Image (spheres, grey):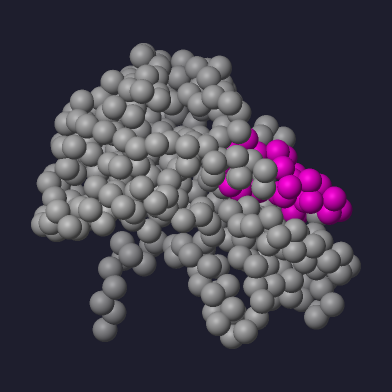
Amino acid sequence: MDFISDRIKSLASSQTLAMSQKSAELRAAGVDVINLSVGEPDFHTPAHIKDAAKHAIDENFTFYSPVPGYMSLRKAIAAKLSRENGLTFAPEQIVVSGGAKQALCNVILSTINPGDEVIIPTPAWVSYVEMVKLAGGTNVLVPATIESDFKITPAQLEAAITPRTRMLLLCSPSNPTGSVYTRDELQELVEVIDRHKDIIVMADEIYEHINYTGSFTSVGSFASIADRTVIINGVSKAYAMTGWRIGYCAAPVAIAKACTKLQGQYTSGASSIAQKAAEAAYEGPQDCVEEMRLAFERRRDLVVELARRIPGLKVNKPNGAFYLFPEVSSYFGKKAPDGRVINNASDLSMYLLEVGHVATVAGDAFCAPGYIRLSYATSDDNLRQAMERIARSLADLV
């Protein structure tokens, strides 16, 4: 008897997690794999944040926390949004969850009805499409290419809107491309949304601080749509706290209440200790954020330089996050020395893993066939060695 629901059967497995698992299995078998598939900083959580967590344990913050998070943390988040982004949110509009991923899913499940359409610019993070499917919604994918720095135009957005459109899901800086919308570009998209009063904008801004443009504009800063904008953010990327699992949504009151209601029925409040650590992250010294950003920018420059030396890779210069997303279709149809034929990006990614011993993620995972994603959240030495292996492996294709 089959005990698995159709709902779960309809979901795709996370290809990023699958590639990380495959890479780990090869390393456990003694293969020297360089993992460029992981979407997390390689730095340790700053000491003052870890100290705050230890202090929280000593102070017995070991009981259930309120479902939407400790009021002290929600106040710290509200202060951050005001200080850094010029946004006004009351603590009651903030719901703390077990990571930004849960915050995203909370909002989608709380706002999307079966048949509602969600516009997702692609390439897009692997879980957006699956979350919409879980809610019974319809994904409307709007493709952008490397020629446009992976950013959609107002005309594309307008053309995608129908009477069933319920949400625009925008990620800037982007995973997987590293693209960052300028304020002027966002303004043009906002002008389109402003003409359609029933559309919610959900802005995934988790990579906000890993940004090489010198400025960041939150979608929530546009007054004309502020009352139907939801901000998603958290501590994982800026403070190297991926394992602590703290993210949040900042939303209109009705949506925040709905997310609290939903979360209260399946996970309740996020980890009490991790919440106190996140509070220290927001209220403590911010030097660590800039130090990590500078390291990522240096690595970005290095990996772009090395990738541009490889014939057949089409590369842009990403302005944020820690990913390179080269176009690789020039290798399709070629044959490897072991006889395999590279038919698509998945074949190429597996070839690079099994032969070159470098883990990447095929663009198919991000609704972008023809590309692969490389994370440069690793050491300069690892990046140099990985790009040398990639260059050598690609040169062997005929």
- Measured along the vertical axis of the image, is residue 127 above or below residue 357? above
Q: Name the one closer to the observer, 328 or 270.
A: 270
Q: Position of residue 7 (x, y in %)?
A: 31, 62
Q: Name the one closer to the observer, 347 or 99.
A: 99
- Tell me the residue at 50%/17% (across/down): 187
Q: Name the one closer to the observer, 339 or 172.
A: 172
In the rendered structure, does residue 248 fall within the stretch colored magenta?
no
> Which quarter of the rendering shows the N terminus?
bottom left
Q: Position of residue 152 (x, y in %)?
A: 58, 31
Q: Would residue 293 appear left or right of 307 to someone viewing this image?
A: left
Q: Would residue 25 appear left or right of 264 to someone viewing this image?
A: right
Q: Position of residue 371 (x, y in %)?
A: 67, 52
Predominant SS of the magenta segment? loop
- Tell me the residue at 19%/44% (across/down): 69
Number of numbered discs: 0
Residue 55 in view here: yes
Which residues, given as a range, are shown in magenta?
A: 301-329
In the rendered structure, does residue 310 fall within the stretch colored magenta?
yes
- Tell me the residue at 38%/45% (across/down): 235
- Measured along the vertical axis of the image, is residue 283 above or below residue 325? above
Q: Quadrant of residue 161?
A: top left
> Which quarter of the rendering shows the C terminus?
bottom right
Q: Position of residue 378 (x, y in %)?
A: 61, 57
- Tell me the residue at 31%/35% (across/down): 283
- Measured along the vertical axis of the image, is residue 94 above or below residue 102? above
Q: Quadrant of residue 193?
A: top left
